Amino acid sequence: MQEPHVVILGGGFAGLGAMEKLKDAPVKITLIDQNNYHTFQPLLYQLATNELDANQVGFPIREMMHRQDNALFHQAKVMSVDLDNKVVHLDRMEPIPYDYLVVSMGAVVNFFGTKGAQEYAFPLYTMRDALLLKTHINRLLEAVDKNPALIDEGALNFCIVGGGPTGVETAGALSELLHAVAFKDYPNLPINEKAQIILFEAGPKLLKPFKSKLQKYAKKALEKLDVTVRLEEGVSEIDPTHITLSSGELVKTHTLVWAAGIQAHPLANSLGVEQVRGGRIPVEPDLSLNSRSEVFVVGDIALITDTKTNELLPQLGSVAQQAGRHVGENIERLVNGKQTEPFEYTDKGTMAAIGRGAAIVQMPGNGTMTGHAAWLAWLGVHLALLAGGEEKSSTIVDWGWNILTKKRGKRITLTDEDLEAVIATSEKRESEQENE
Ligand SMILES: Cc1cc2nc3c(=O)[nH]c(=O)nc-3n(C[C@H](O)[C@H](O)[C@H](O)COP(=O)(O)OP(=O)(O)OC[C@H]3O[C@@H](n4cnc5c(N)ncnc54)[C@H](O)[C@@H]3O)c2cc1C
């Protein structure tokens, strides 16, 4: 008898978690991702601020597959899923049938219709986003170096919208980039005197899900890093050289980092299933789709209710990874003729790092941590998320080295000519290959 075919859509924390748990199961697995690498999203802001390189934040999926004999990988874009006929449709590839399906394609940015955001904001949710922001910052500093008059036009004003963990962490990292590194790279520029980092949050507090004392600590820690925190102030329009706030005020800036929200991956809209809260798909306690026991939905695209607390689980790497692993176990149970089990999340704490040595941790129960101890806990949890596989070890080593030395060695940017040549050459080759 043929082994059941498990198709996993998305090689993020959830998809990889499911695949790894099925390592010894009597199944054939096909993992599909549009990229040939796994993106470690929690480190994207380190990439954007020159602390890490792209190959330390993205890990080649094919290399991870060396450890798994029952799985194959295809780099392909998922276009749609035919749930009735159990088939996945891909871009420029034959459709793939499945016996079990894991939908784990994550989330995408949500600009909430803000004018100019699509064109001029810098979101920070994908490798490409982080590389664009990094290149923009490096080129902007070079432009100011050539023409310091740009400072009066707001070129050294770095704005971030969204006071959640991504916005807070990015603001802290930008401050460290400017005040610990860039002022030395550009000794002729008044970076320490003139550069401004402004964090806008539409609500009355930063880091909404955290306890009040942690919110206050985070605000103080950011202010210590010279970040201006503006609460109850949203961004209503974005232009290349300024933003308009909800109050009508104009702020000169060439950089608006968008950290204000995500929505479920648009594939969710095409499945014809129930969607709530930013398009997420509610799942059963065993993480399967209501009325489709062979389809499991996990990670940021899913709306998972904690079976212990009855509360909705947040869109976090640790939730995605644990849920993905649970789905792997449930599929193995089904293949072996057993019943699936409900998912129980083990909360290791919610946390955010504000800068080197400053972080906040809300522990399960009522405990909290701040400062160095919290920062070490943050580091530990991220190292645990990173663990598994030699391909990730250089990230740990380089990251540790940067932390110890406060150095950022990843500031090389390609010139326009080089970038255009690389893109044009690969596009030409691809079209020639397609025409052959
Ligand atoms: C900047 C940032 C910082 C974060 N920091 C933390 C943190 O400190 N701690 C924490 O726990 N969580 C953090 N998170 C959240 C965490 O990264 C996510 O919750 C987690 O990545 C979700 O995992 P996932 O597997 O659902 O989705 P993802 O990791 O997003 O994976 C989805 C995969 O699907 C693929 N895909 C998408 N569309 C297609 C398509 N059409 N065809 C084929 N493949 C496709 C993508 O390429 C991707 O590989 C952070 C997120 C961001 C953006």
Image: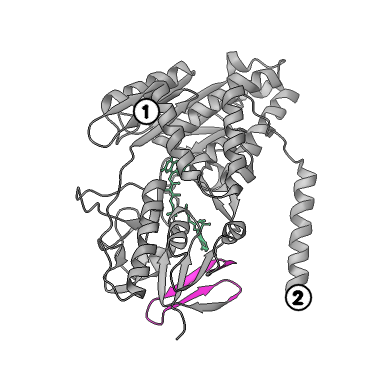
Residue extending farthest front = 24
Quick one: 6 or 205, which is closer to the camera?
6
* Disc 2, SS: helix
For disc 2, the neighbor class at 10 Å (few under 14, some 14 to 19, many from 20) is few
Residue 135 point in image, percent of width and height: 66, 38
Label at residue 360 = 1
Q: Is residue 99 left or right of residue 421?
A: left
- Residue 263 to residue 122: above or below: below
> What's the amino acid at mark 1?
Ile
Label at residue 265 = none
- Residue 111 to residue 335: above or below: above
* Disc 1, SS: strand
The secondary structure making up most of the magenta span is: strand
Tell me, yes or no, if residue 128 can be seen here: no
Which quarter of the rendering shows the C terminus? Answer: bottom right
Instruction: Reply yes or no: does residue 81 show up in magenta.
Output: yes
Instruction: Reply yes or no: does residue 86 show up in magenta.
Output: yes
